[in-house]
Amino acid sequence: MGKLFCVEHAVGRSNLVNTMTKPIQTPNMFCITLLRHGESQGNFEGRHQGQADFPLTDIGRAQTKALVDRWIAEKKEFDLVISSPLLRARETAQVLASQLDIPIEFDPIWMERDNGLMAGLSPEEVLETLPQYDFIHPYQPIGQTGESQWELYLRAGKAVQSLINKSPRSYLIVSHGGFLNMFFYATLGIVPQPNFHGPRFRFNNTAFATLNYNPSSHRWYVLGVNDHLHVNSMEG
Amino acid sequence: MFITLLRHGESERNLSGVLQGQSDYPLTPAGLEQARQLASIWKFEDTKFDLTTSSPLRRAPQAHYNSPIFHFGNTGYAQFSYNLSTRQWAILCFNDQIKLPQSGGFISWKTD
């Protein structure tokens, strides 16, 4: 199985300053990598996807391959891949799990927001077919029948809980931009705002964020956000 | 509006592990090397800035947070955008450390 310790710690540099700011190496540390799926057909067409099920595009598959190559070069290790069962995440996760030789499980708790009647529509189609509101409160269903900001936030809270109920290991989560933003809200203590205000955590396709959690101190550490250098180098 | 927050490179007192506050210590040779590494990454990415604001201390002061912590390793940086019309903040990226080539980091990886 992979490593339990995710944060490299220079020998002889353990000190007061670092205990206050730096994840302390402990066998209890959860190492969590949050990955957004590769480009999907819905992304390519600029559609509101939600739980509408689009496959990856060839670009999405190439992004995934670039990430595999990068993580092989970096000797990155995970104990378990947990993925949303939606096609775009599933395909991304399956390639990573098989190429990096990691066990995989699927859990619908990591699916994208149920965006109701917006699912699969282009922004123009949404404007034509659905009522527009001047003010959207955090409890209002999205797309008439979908999950409100608050419901999404609660589901993300449950996802955090389901992860921490496991043993402290190195997990790769393959999920979706909207949902992973709420994962950040749930761990950082940001509550949903009206009109979708509140900060956004950028997740490009196959970008990942790295978090550590120490249950002995109840500390979350954010080590990286929107790392997609493998995609940059593809374009270059 | 784009904003990048950068922590200073390793200082002599980071190395010896004393709380610094506003007491003032210079960078170590490793700290200077970290800054060079970062410069090469930003050159590679074609990252440009209009203005740089720095702490007057030779290194910048270190913040102490309660949980949770955005871990800024030496020369770790965060990039934000702020949309003046929607008043929306976005966290564009955050890197807690320079990944050195010898550790299989991205510099060697992407120039292979």
Image: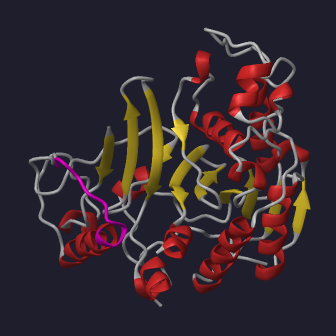
Residue at image location 61% in from the left, 43% down from the top: A218
- Direction bottom: furthest residue: B112
On the question of residue B20 being in view, the answer is: yes
Residue A95: image quadrant is bottom right
Residue at image location 36% in from the left, 26% down from the top: B84
The residue lying toward the viewer, choosing from A97 and A130, is A130
The region drawn magenta spans B43-52
The residue lying toward the viewer, choosing from B74 and A215, is B74
* In magenta stretch: residue A4: no
- Direction top: furthest residue: A134
Compared to B67, does B40 lie above or below?
below
Residue at image location 46% in from the left, 48% down from the top: B92
* Residue B50 image offset from top left, x and y in percent: 19, 48
Quarter of the figure with the N terminus of chain A: bottom right
Compared to A97, does A150 lie above or below?
above
Left or right of A230: which side holds A3?
Answer: right
Compared to A37, does B62 lie above or below?
above
On the question of residue A193 being in view, the answer is: no
* Residue B59 image offset from top left, x and y in percent: 17, 56
Compared to A92, does A100 lie above or below?
below
The residue lying toward the viewer, choosing from B16 and A85, is A85
Left or right of B31: which side holds A81?
Answer: right
